[in-house]
Image (spheres, rainbow, N blue to C red):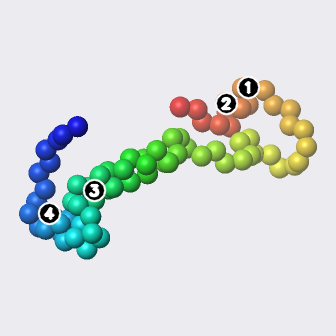
Amino acid sequence: MRTTVDIPDAIYRQLKAQAAHEGTSAKKLILRGVEKVLTENCRKPKGKRIKFPIVPFERTGLIRIDNARIYDIISFP
């Protein structure tokens, strides 16, 4: 697919110099950058990490708890 992108002159000169330094084309360098951004976005976690224990408790062992108490302890969106 073809697209048009306006690149400021100073950045384009840097792009061409970097491509020449690596022995590649500006197009390949741009595509490598786009692929890098897309793969980094796929690796990001989708949500908030959960820290255990979810329900704090002073002692180890069996916890007798009901839904009302869970809703009091944990904030739900």
| Element class at badge 1 | helix
Tags 1 and 2 in contact by the CB under 8 Å rule? yes
* Residue receiving disc 1: 67
Quadrant for residue 67, please give it. top right
* Disc nearest the viewer among 1 and 3: 3
* First in residue order: circle 1 vs circle 3: 3
Residue depicted at x 28% and y 59%: 29
Residue occupying image coordinates x 50% and y 48%? 43
Q: Residue at x 23, y 61 (%)?
A: 25
Tell me which label, 4 or 1, sits earlier in the chain: 4
Residue occupied by mark 3:
28
In the picture of the structure, the residue carrying the numbered disc 4 is: 12
Label of residue 71 in the image? 2
Q: Amino acid at mark 4?
A: Tyr
Q: Looking at numbered disc 1 in the image, what kind of residue is underneath it?
A: Asn
Name the foreground residue: 17 vs 53: 17
Label 3 sits on what residue type? Lys
Q: Disc 2 marks which amino acid? A: Tyr
Ranked by sequence position, the earlier of labels 4 and 2 is 4
Which callout, 4 or 2, points to the residue nearer the camera?
4
